[in-house]
Amino acid sequence: MLAPLVVLLFMAAGCQTLSESLPETDMKASGESGISGRVVLRETGQPVQGVHVYAYTDYSKNLIGVADHVSKGSDNDGSYLLTLPPGEYYLVARKRVSGANYGPIVTGDLYDHRFEQKAFRIEEGGVLEKDFELEKLSEPMFFQVFTESQRKTMTGIRGRIFDQDGESVQGAFATAYRSSDMKRLPDFASTLTGDDGSFTLYLPTGGKWYIAARSHARAAPEPGEPVGRYDGSDDHSLQVTENSFVEGVEIVLKPFSSQVPAGYTPY
């Protein structure tokens, strides 16, 4: 059953403050820096009104919680503007059916289906052009999120995620299951991997945990999606000691195929 899981993708702790954005011509004339562009539906290319664009300075926190900067809702032609100080930002776009600019992403919301796993550089006085394609969320996404105080339990797993060629994978995450039934939403997910493929997976207790990894936060993998399981044991499990971390865990992602036996299907 999915009810016991806490599905908190993109959860914010409270209301986010909208950044004031000048018209693009005024931004350039005044020397303000930021981003501008249009938001459209992926399937039809039609513009979307009321989309908020979010700028984060830290990718490792799964792009959850209060963003560093949030735009006003996009106009009826899908255009948006967001004034930003110079720096590097990770950018996503979302529209919630509730009309709020914060809170969990739920079924029916529009989200940036392929947010880019790289930082965009905003130069002094520069306006970056960035368009977004959104799609409707049709199935739950998953992340069990720990607060900073809960992370101080210092129990979990650290490691790296690679592709078949041995290259580090950025923007992926490891998952942990309490039981060997790994064909369901995980009980916990790690922070997103950085440039070197490293992750930290915080766990509430020690014990035996079954470990996998994903590249997307959908409930079921799509054909070709990189997925993997920990191969350091026959049943993909790790024994974790209370108040300590298992270090150096490596997981290799391989393209998921519908021909893979059902027992391998990692949700």
Image (cartoon, helix red, strand yellow):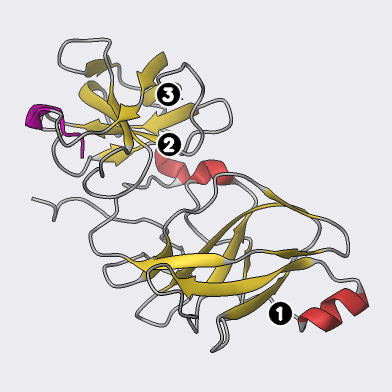
Residue 91: give x, y in percent of width and height.
59, 58
At label 3, which amino acid type do we have? Asp
Residue 111: give x, y in percent of width and height.
41, 65
Who's the residue at 61% across and 44% down the image?
118
At label 2, which amino acid type do we have? Ala
Name the side, left or right, on which 77 lies relative to 200: right
The residue pinned by badge 1 equals 20
Q: Residues within 10 Å of mark 1 (few under 14, many from 20)?
A: few
**Residue 216 falls in which quadrant of the image?**
top left
**Residue 53 falls in which quadrant of the image?**
bottom right
| First to last magenta residue range | 261-267
Residue 55: give x, y in percent of width and height.
62, 60
- What distance separates the C-alpha of mark 2 from that of mark 3? 11 Å
Q: Is residue 131 magenta?
A: no
Indicate the secondary structure of the residue bearing disc 1: loop
The residue pinned by badge 2 equals 172
Who's the residue at 29% across and 50% down the image?
218
Question: Nearer the N terminus, badge 2 or badge 3?
Answer: 3
Indicate the secondary structure of the residue bearing disc 2: loop
The residue pinned by badge 3 equals 163
Q: Nearer the viewer, residue 204 or 145?
A: 145
Q: Badges 1 and 2: C-beta atoms under 8 Å apart?
A: no
Residue 247 appears in the figure: no
Indicate the secondary structure of the residue bearing disc 3: loop
